[in-house]
Image: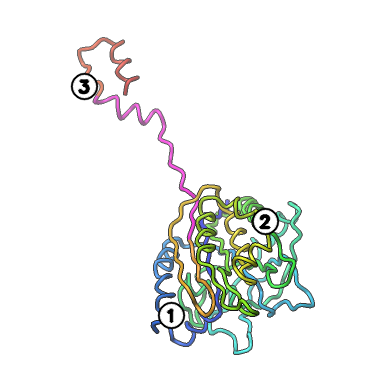
Amino acid sequence: MAKITAGVGSSHVPAIGAALDNGKTQEPYWQRVFSGFEKSKEWMKEFKPDVAIIVFNDHATSFSVDMIPTFALGCAAEYPIADEGWGARPVPVVKGHAKLAAHIAQSVIEDEFDLTIVNKMEVDHGLTVPMSLMFGEKKPTEEWPCPVIPLAVNVVMFPPPTGNRCYNLGKAIRKAVESYPEDLNVVIFGTGGLSHQISGPRAGLINSKWDKAFLDNLSKNPKKLTAIKHLDYMREAGAEGIEMVMWLIMRGALDEKVDEVYRFYTVPASNTAVGHIILENQKKAKKTSAKKISAKSAKPAAKRAAAATKADVKKSKVRK
């Protein structure tokens, strides 16, 4: 069966994409940002996902204020790169996994999450920037290492979904993936944030203390995060800090207990706090059969107890 085995959290700052596309990654300002993802790219090469589910928010490219679905699941075969006003990013078209996406839609809707099914969608920096950071730079003529299922979440216009709703959607997605018959290794991304505000009197706000506590709890106590109210996100993390609820979809799709493989945090990139985390489900230790254990321990026990009675031999085996 398919299984979600790891989750990635990453900011999706548009200026990061511009720095990549314009060859500025080695400039002092940007070098510290990109250096934080070098280990992540190595991890991704070793992890080798068959599919990536990427939770992001559309920035008025596929959806306008005329129509904003709370949760929109991409079920297409591919997703062109959106032109956000300065030309489409020079990266490959994103290939989809339509069969798994349709299966997720069926399962999640039966679990009473009302998804919008999207069969035609352009994807913007919210999705492509985390892909570039995790998979490395790719030319338009190349292909991304695996197909992608995009899940767009409304965190642009109020009311956005609650953190608790997002967390439980993650659980429903996990259930859906695990009921898919094909053997697939799946990674899920939660993108956006961390603290930032791009307009108004508090433009430029960054709250590192809040961000780091969020990352701590994401790893160890995610249920605590599900209780955070919209107003708290706005007050503590800025108007755009509400994007952090998308990380809870990723977290809900993982085990309750996870291993934190890697974490990176820096400020600022453009006017945003850059957060990044990699979480893996804890690997289950393989149980060694009692027969194998007793067989290994019986030989030395027999040598030491060569002169003992049968009853003594049995006792020595029990002690072993």
How would you rate the neighbour count of disc 3 (Cα within 10 Å): few for under 14, some for 14-19, many for 20 or more? few
* Residues at marks 1 and 2, CA–CA distance in whole angstroms: 35 Å
Secondary structure found at label 1: helix
Magenta-tinted stretch: 278-300
Residue shown at the point (71%, 59%) measured from the top left: 105
Vertical placement of residue 62 versus 283, above or below = below
The label shown at residue 56 is none
Q: What residue is disc 2 on? A: 169
Q: Amino acid at mark 1?
A: Trp
The label shown at residue 303 is 3
Q: Earlier in the sequence, mark 1 or mark 3?
A: 1
Horizontal and vertical percent for residue 119?
Answer: 72, 71
139 vs 197, left or right, is left
Q: What residue is disc 1 on? A: 30
Horizontal and vertical percent for residue 210?
Answer: 54, 62
Vertical placement of residue 89 versus 181, above or below = below
